[in-house]
Image: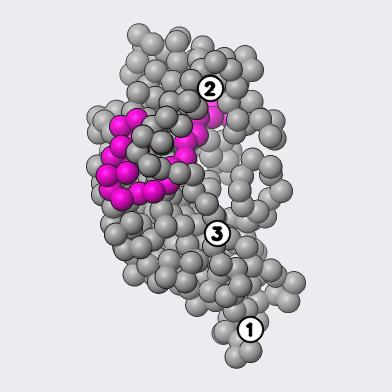
């Protein structure tokens, strides 16, 4: 099989902040420095967005990427608007801000530097230990109560992770990154996400144990979501790698999604229902108590925000 080649197209949007009113997420604004993601996670719910570029949610999503080099400048412009009011900006909501091409483009770092200069709160979600490359900026943001980092750990099995997330950091590296963040005083949590029935769910307790031993104090979990083209891609992956249990996996997923592969309704899509969902929820809660973990409490300080001037410089007032 030929090695996959990654191409990157520069994208120049007019604005970089995306605002939402969804009841399913704990933030109302986000930044995605990239479109597409080299990590290649088969379950990624963002895959269908590549169709907007007439590209496939399959290999195109993993190899034909888009970068937004003007992200920091656009953020400054938005923060300078008289009507702008500070609230945490979420990074990593659609594609990973620390996927491999960040090493070359450093767009995520530039955005974090703007947040530090303007004292703007930000949250980061990733499955890469590359986040440690920006620990200097992140630690300073943490000192000012301006950042929280979540690292997704799907399993503790490196081989399984390689099948699910072929170009993401290994589970061991992600746990080690959480330890470094915690040691540096950065508020961080482990996200057991996604939980895939009969594939990764048996790792729930182990992940929480490892995270607690690394000094992490908070954890969350999310059940797998299979919107649009993700469902057939995931079914094909199951038949290739786990044909013995493919039917059971999909039957369980449908049982927690009202009989469908995915439930897209606002207020429902992030809340699995049914016996299996209750079982996962109970197991997670018991393991949380056993290891002294709690849910993340997003209490970042918005009062320090310093609005930049229209030309991107900080105001003297």
* Sequence-earlier tag: 3 or 1: 3
Q: Residue furthest right?
A: 83
Magenta stretch holds residue 220: yes
In this view, 77 is above or below 300: below
In this view, 62 is above or below 301: above
Q: Which residue is denoted by mark 1 in the rendering?
A: 309
Q: Which residue is denoted by mark 2 in the rendering?
A: 277
Give residue 312's quadrant in the image.
bottom right
Residue 278: give x, y in percent of width and height.
53, 22
Q: Residue furthest bottom?
A: 316
Distance of label 1 from label 2 (alpha carbons): 49 Å
Residue 292: give x, y in percent of width and height.
38, 42
Residue 285: give x, y in percent of width and height.
46, 32
Magenta stretch holds residue 263: no
Residue 211 falls left or right of residue 7: left
SS under mark 1:
loop
Q: Give the quarter of the figure containing the C terminus.
A: bottom right
Q: Which residue is denoted by mark 3 in the rendering?
A: 299
Residue 299 falls left or right of residue 96: right
């Amino acid at each position: 099989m030929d090695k996959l080649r990654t191409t990157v197209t520069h994208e120049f949007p007019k604005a970089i902040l995306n605002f939402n009113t969804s009841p399913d997420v704990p933030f109302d604004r986000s930044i995605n420095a990239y479109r597409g993601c080299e990590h290649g996670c088969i379950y990624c719910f963002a895959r269908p967005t590549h169709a907007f570029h007439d590209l496939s949610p399959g290999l195109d999503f993993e190899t034909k990427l888009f970068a937004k080099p003007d992200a920091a400048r656009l953020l400054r412009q938005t923060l300078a608007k008289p009507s702008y009011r500070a609230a945490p900006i979420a990074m990593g909501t659609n594609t990973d801000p620390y996927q491999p091409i960040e090493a070359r483009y450093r767009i995520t770092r530039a955005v974090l530097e703007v947040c530090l200069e303007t004292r703007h709160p930000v949250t980061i979600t990733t499955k890469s230990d590359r986040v440690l490359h920006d620990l200097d900026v992140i630690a300073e943001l943490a000192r000012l109560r301006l950042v929280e980092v979540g690292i997704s750990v799907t399993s503790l099995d490196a081989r399984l992770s390689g099948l699910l997330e072929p170009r993401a950091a290994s589970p061991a590296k992600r746990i080690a990154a959480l330890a470094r963040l915690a040691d540096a005083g950065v508020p961080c949590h482990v996200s057991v996400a996604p939980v895939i029935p009969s594939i990764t769910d048996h790792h729930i307790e182990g992940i929480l144990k490892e995270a607690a031993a690394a000094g992490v104090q908070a954890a969350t979990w999310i059940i797998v979501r299979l919107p649009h083209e993700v469902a057939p891609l995931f079914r094909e992956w199951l038949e290739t790698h786990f044909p013995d249990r493919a039917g059971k996996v999909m039957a369980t997923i449908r049982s927690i999604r009202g009989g469908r592969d995915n439930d897209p309704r606002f207020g429902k899509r992030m809340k699995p229902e049914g016996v299996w969902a209750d079982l996962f929820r109970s197991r997670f809660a018991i393991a949380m108590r056993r290891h002294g973990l709690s849910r993340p409490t997003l209490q970042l300080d918005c009062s320090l925000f310093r609005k930049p001037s229209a030309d991107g410089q900080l105001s003297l007032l």
